[in-house]
Amino acid sequence: MCAMLMIALVLASPLARAACQAEPPIVTVVPSLPDPPVDNSLNRVSLKELSPNAGHPQGFYQSRLEIQSTVKMRAARACMSITEVELRVTSLGRRIFIASEWRPASCAYGAILGHERKHQAVDDQLVQEQSAKIRDTMRASIIEAGPVVSGPAVQQVVKDRLTKIVQDAMHRALETLTEEEQRRETAVDSPSEYARVAASCPELH
């Protein structure tokens, strides 16, 4: 049955395809990065278990960027198209950890928190900078795919096809965003930055 439906899509008449027109889609990107809570409940051994690659962590910033989508489509006559896409860029599990050996009133706590806030700022700035690029790339992908000739018998197949176009573009955008995030976050953890933090408090020497 699926094969027959796909054949029906391919064999749509040139007249039907020519009549299948759509306005450019409205694409919006909504940055939605929550302010990370500060967790001071775990000691350094526990932090090491949470982040095995962190060496001997006094604290660390945890975040995983994600893009979520809401898609609106329109079926008009024998044509289906994407009319609106909202992309919400957020972060799952966003949190700052500071080892419980350092209490909030201590110099070390403040120095470590200041460093981790730099990681937070990297994500905030990155998402703001890349929002327009993500929007334009998604819009171009939808326009390139164009509206699709549809009908009652193949409507769900067409809907799935259009949904996949959005998902594929969204996954590519997330890959690019994550790669750039990793590059920038690594740059924050420079030897000079670690030396600055260590030198700021006697207990961190």
Image (tube, rainbow, N blue to C red):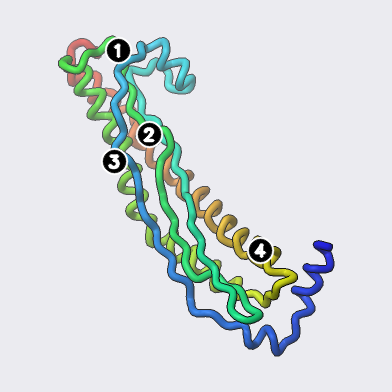
Q: CA distance from mark 1 to mark 2?
A: 19 Å
Label 3 Cα crowd, 10 Å radius (few <14 / some 14-19 / many 20+): few
Towards the viewer: 19 or 193: 19
Spot occupied by residue 171 in the image (x, y as percentages of width and height)? 55, 51
Q: Earlier in the sequence, mark 4 or mark 2?
A: 2
Between the C-alphas of marks 4 and 3, the distance is 37 Å
Write down the quadrant of residue 21 in the picture. Answer: bottom right
Question: At x 75% / y 85%, what residue is drawn?
Answer: 13
Of 119 and 165, nearer the camera is 165
Residue ID for mark 3 = 121
Report the quarter where the C terminus lies.
top left
Q: CA distance from mark 1 to mark 3?
A: 23 Å
Q: Are marks 1 and 2 in contact (CB under 8 Å)?
A: no
- Amino acid type for the residue under numbered disc 2: Arg
Q: Nearer the viewer, residue 165 or 84?
A: 84
Residue ID for mark 4: 161
Left or right of 105 on screen, residue 189:
right
Q: Position of residue 69 (x, y in %)?
A: 49, 54
Real-space Cα separation, disc 1 to disc 4, in angstroms:
50 Å
